[in-house]
Image (cartoon, rainbow, N blue to C red):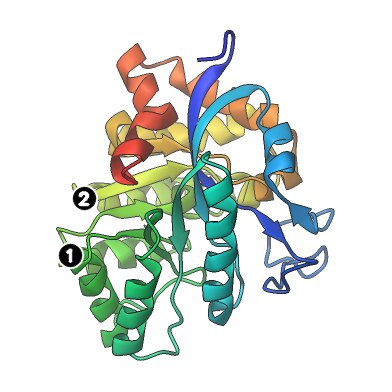
Amino acid sequence: MTHGKRAFVDAHMHLWDSIANPWYAFPVPGNDWGLGLKDCFPARFLLAEYGQAVASMDVRKCVHVTAVTRAKDAVAESRWIEAVARAEPLIRATVGTVDLAMSLNEIETALDRETASPRFRGIRILNGMDYDDPLSQGILRTLTRRKLVYDAVTRFDKGIAAAAAALRGHEQLTVILEHCGWPSTHGTDQFTSWRRELRELAALPNTYCKLSGVGMWTHQADSQVLGSYYQACIDLFGPERCMFASNFPVDLSYGQADAVFAAFEAVAQKYNAREQAALFGGVAEQIYLI
């Protein structure tokens, strides 16, 4: 560990070059999907920019998560990030996606192609899945058979509860809830309802939670505000099933990187050294096999 810096395994980060690789249709101020953006995302965010953002931490390993906004571009992005990762050992695992317009057989073929990479660990579906759709259930069974993880993207107000209900039939699948369940932040009643839904998912022993992304919905990087969400997640999942993650560069839209890390530290101080090590990297290493 670098002297004075916290060892950290970043369980969720993105790289992109939207100038060279036209795979991204990002939100913009005024048409930002409710993200409260004041500025556009950077056109490029590569390892040099990531390294500057996390300079105050001793980042040991990263999990790269797909950022394509059109699933048809996932294969091209996977090839690109695989080339980046071969040259930079910091990226130890990748999470891709699949195109829900494909048949289950086509999706299975795509996953088999992706698993040729030693770094590929599973998928996320950026717009979420309709769990009542037989295709979604087939995808979850396919992930289980291939021992891949499912990074669950949900939306608050019944979305987390719907995921919990559907996933009760997939006990052997490792499920990671992204960004604390993408909570909404419109007062105490909303927070209480979000926490109630979160409890349903946390009751499933094969579920884990990424402590990240809250800035997207609070539109700020206040460590006390972020920490209130992180703490609620840890209270329900336990430190052995939670992992800190930067969500950079997206969360850099709401404040400085050190404000995000300050929120991590403030919450972590309530736990012993073993639990802190789990939150800052041990859980991510276990789940993503890195």
Do the numbered discs 2 and 1 sit on residues whose CB atoms are within 8 Å? yes
Crowding at dot 1, Cα within 10 Å, few <14 / some 14-19 / many 20+, comes out as some
Q: Callout 1: helix, strand or loop?
A: loop
Quarter-of-image position of residue 225:
top right
Q: Is residue 41 visible?
A: no
> Where is residue 22 drawn, in percent x and y?
73, 74
Q: Is residue 81 visible?
A: yes
Q: Is residue 236 above or below residue 264?
A: below
The quarter of the image holding the C terminus is top left
- Tell me if 36 is positioned left or right of 207 in this view: right
Q: Which mark is residue 170?
A: 1
Task: Name the residue nearer the viewer: 119 or 142.
Answer: 119
User: Which residue is disc 2 drawn over?
Assistant: 206
Q: Amino acid at mark 2?
A: Asn
> Where is residue 202 drawn, in percent x and y?
27, 47
Q: Earlier in the sequence, mark 2 or mark 1?
A: 1
- Tell me if 102 is positioned left or right of 87 in this view: left
Q: Which mark is residue 277?
A: none
Cα–Cα gap, marks 2 and 1? 9 Å
